[in-house]
């Protein structure tokens, strides 16, 4: 298994579950025109043999189709120089790198068995009704500082490849997460903790609770995309770094 490609595949297929559409025929671009506002080149578009108009500074007509709120994800390419050309083109057209994520993975056969959840009063449940979805969305809104569209999330509780989780501390909802299974890989996404519960070990307890779920779901690897803040936690839990994803948004 090419774990780098598996990580990217899991990520973009989740964006597809969020209702992404094709907004440009060539280069092929997919986009969420609502939350989470992600845009990206179709993976086959980035094949080394394809010469794309995006690599010509004189051809930027494809940018017209980008949603105003779009956040373009520059996924890693085999040709690093080609990727640099494309990122420079975004900058030239008034886009700026608004944030980065580090792709990471964990082989489940390397999980340390004695690294167990230790936070008193913490428990995790699977989300299965509208009230729990609203709690899940509220936690994400506060943790990430943006508005999650609940109409995007609601259909996911009936998707066989997705599980939503709430973490409770002393019977109060304090944390959220989403698991998405693609083949033998499970992606951990939307890990959020309420502000007043951060830096108290809740995030660690949540991830530790999710790891055995991934094992019982017959996955061989866990993948995720970590923010700078979360990266150190995932390293301590045994996740390994893969590559950087840069996200570009047009300056207002």
Image: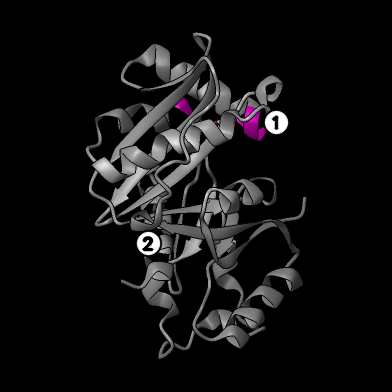
Colouring mode (rainbow / by chain / secondary structure / one colour): one colour
SS at badge 1: loop
* Residue nearest the viewer, comparing 128 with 114: 114
- The residue most toward the top is 171
Residue at the spot 47% in from the left edge and 48% down from the top edge: 32
The residue under label 2 is: 9
- Few, some or many C-alpha atoms within 10 Å of disc 1 (few <14, some 14-19, many ≥20)? few
Q: Is residue 136 above or below residue 207?
A: above
Per the rendered image, the range of residues in magenta is 143-150
* Residue nearest the viewer, comparing 101 with 87: 101
Query: What is the CA distance from the residue labelled 1 to the residue labelled 2?
Result: 31 Å
* Prevailing secondary structure of the magenta residues: loop
Residue 3: horizontal and vertical position, in percent? 39, 68
Residue 134: horizontal and vertical position, in percent? 47, 17
Left or right: residue 143 compared with residue 153: right
Q: Is residue 122 above or below residue 114?
A: above
Which numbered disc, 1 or 2, marks the residue closer to the eye?
A: 1
Q: Looking at the image, is mark 1 or mark 2 earlier in the sequence?
A: 2
Residue at the spot 38% in from the left edge and 30% down from the top edge: 164
Residue 198 magenta-highlighted: no
The residue under label 1 is: 199
| Residue 28 badge | none
């Amino acid at each position: 298994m090419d774990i780098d490609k598996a990580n990217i595949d899991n990520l973009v297929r989740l964006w597809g579950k969020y209702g992404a559409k094709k907004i440009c025929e060539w280069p092929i671009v997919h986009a969420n025109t609502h939350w989470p506002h992600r845009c990206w080149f179709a993976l086959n578009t980035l094949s080394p043999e394809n010469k794309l108009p995006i690599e010509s500074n004189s051809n930027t007509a494809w940018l017209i189709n980008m949603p105003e709120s779009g956040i373009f994800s520059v996924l890693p390419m085999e040709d690093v120089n080609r990727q640099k050309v494309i990122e420079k083109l975004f900058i030239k057209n008034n886009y700026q790198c608004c944030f980065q994520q580090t792709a990471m993975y964990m082989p489940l056969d390397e999980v340390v068995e004695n690294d167990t959840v230790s936070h008193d009063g913490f428990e995790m449940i699977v989300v299965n009704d509208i009230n729990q979805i609203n709690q899940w969305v509220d936690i994400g809104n506060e943790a990430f500082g943006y508005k999650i569209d609940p109409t995007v999330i609601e259909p996911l509780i009936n998707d066989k490849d997705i599980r939503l989780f709430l973490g409770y501390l002393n019977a109060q909802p304090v944390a959220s997460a989403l698991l998405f299974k693609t083949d033998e890989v499970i992606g951990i996404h939307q890990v959020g903790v309420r502000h007043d519960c951060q830096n108290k070990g809740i995030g660690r307890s949540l991830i530790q609770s999710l790891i055995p779920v991934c094992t019982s779901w017959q996955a061989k690897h866990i993948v995720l995309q970590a923010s700078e803040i979360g990266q150190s936690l995932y390293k301590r839990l045994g996740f390994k770094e893969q590559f950087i994803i840069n996200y570009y948004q047009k300056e207002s």
